Image (cartoon, helix red, strand yellow):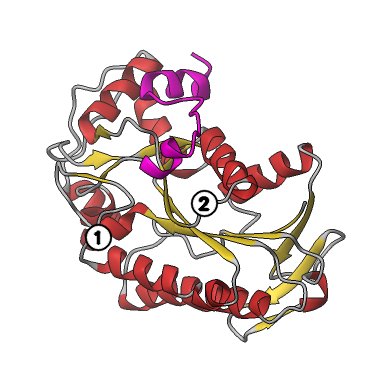
């Protein structure tokens, strides 16, 4: 299979390219810089893409987008978050829809933020979108794939949770504090965290490439945990105490109130019903086992 991948420099994209290549697939990376062998160039900001590299592509995995937690959510950066997703996704969808030889599938990134803050309520792919900035962002992000679906391409939306890896993402940022023994729950710790290991994230994407599923697919472990339970499990994996809670005002001072309220103090209790129903087997379904695998414990 010839697979086109955007966002290949990111945590998930980089791991996915390695996995697909190891499986014997041909991979073309879509990049913004001057392309190297095995790459093609695009620029979502001005709507350009090297279509000659797409003519023999069998599948597209679209993961590109500005980082949700990389900056304070100023009005300007929130526009960047929205535009980086909608412009890029619309460009990919319209371009592959217009090809004479269309890829059979588009797997397009999304996020569990689409469900909004649901408290303790369990949600799956049949649940309606929630409210708030992240939910609205994800709704628009997914809607931008419409040209591909209208052209008969199978489209699946990868509603990803917190991806756990020692070399990137949220866990990498947490590890220094927890290793020092000063990590702990943030605020009340009651917010739900729906997580997935990087290994299972990549395996799920590979599963979806080979399968027939379309529509929303939650890429999360079947065992979400509260923020307090996550902190406790991470402390135990590192053999460090976690009895000191982190007051919410600290992260808010550093990162801004809206970002912290949305990413750290609220959450979603998400179940991967579609994946489980399709026979996908998680390598790391529980958090203690996942952390032991990631941290080598």
Q: Nearer the viewer, mark 1 or mark 2?
A: 2
Identity of the residue drawn at 42% across and 31% down: 175
> Toward the viewer: 3 or 262?
3
Mark 1, residues whose alpha carbon is within 10 Å: few (<14), some, or many (≥20)?
Answer: few
Q: Is residue 150 left or right of residue 116?
A: right
> Toward the viewer: 140 or 30?
140
In the rendered image, the vertical position of residue 25 relative to residue 276, given as above or below: below
Mark 2, residues whose alpha carbon is within 10 Å: few (<14), some, or many (≥20)?
Answer: some
Identity of the residue drawn at 74% across and 60% down: 58
Identity of the residue drawn at 48% across and 70% down: 85
Residue 161: in magenta span: no
SS at badge 1: loop
| Residue 163 in picture, x, y percent from top left | 45, 41
Q: Which residue is mark 1?
A: 128
Q: Is residue 254 left or right of residue 90?
A: left
| Residue 240 in picture, x, y percent from top left | 33, 16
Q: Quadrant of residue 122?
A: top left
- Mark 1 vs mark 2, CA separation in Å: 19 Å
Q: Which residues are magenta?
A: 273-297
The outermost residue toward the bottom is: 46
């Amino acid at each position: 299979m010839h697979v086109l991948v955007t966002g290949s420099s990111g945590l998930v994209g980089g791991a996915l390219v390695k996995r697909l290549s190891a499986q014997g697939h041909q991979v073309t990376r879509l990049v913004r810089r001057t392309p190297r062998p095995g790459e093609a160039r695009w620029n979502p900001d001005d709507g350009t893409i090297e279509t000659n590299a797409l003519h023999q592509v069998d599948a597209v995995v679209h993961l590109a987008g500005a980082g949700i937690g990389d900056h304070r959510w100023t009005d300007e950066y929130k526009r960047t978050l929205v535009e980086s997703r909608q412009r890029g996704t619309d460009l990919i969808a319209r371009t592959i829809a217009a090809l004479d030889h269309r890829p059979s599938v588009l797997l397009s990134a999304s996020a569990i933020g689409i469900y909004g803050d649901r408290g303790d309520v369990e949600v799956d792919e049949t649940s309606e979108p929630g409210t708030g900035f992240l939910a609205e962002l994800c709704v628009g992000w997914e809607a931008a794939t419409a040209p591909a679906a209208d052209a008969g391409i199978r489209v699946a939306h990868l509603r990803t949770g917190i991806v756990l890896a020692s070399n990137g993402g949220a866990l990498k940022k947490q590890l220094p504090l927890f290793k020092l023994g000063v990590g702990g729950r943030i605020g009340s710790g009651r917010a739900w965290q729906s997580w997935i290991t990087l290994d299972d994230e990549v395996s799920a994407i590979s599963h979806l490439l080979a399968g027939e599923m379309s529509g929303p697919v939650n890429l999360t472990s079947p065992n979400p945990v509260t923020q307090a339970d996550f902190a406790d499990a991470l402390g135990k994996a590192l053999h460090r105490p976690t009895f000191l809670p982190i007051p919410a005002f600290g992260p808010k001072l550093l990162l801004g109130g809206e970002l912290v309220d949305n990413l750290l103090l609220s959450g979603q209790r998400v179940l991967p019903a579609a994946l489980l129903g399709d026979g996908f087997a998680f390598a790391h379904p529980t958090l203690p086992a996942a952390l032991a695998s990631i941290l080598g414990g």
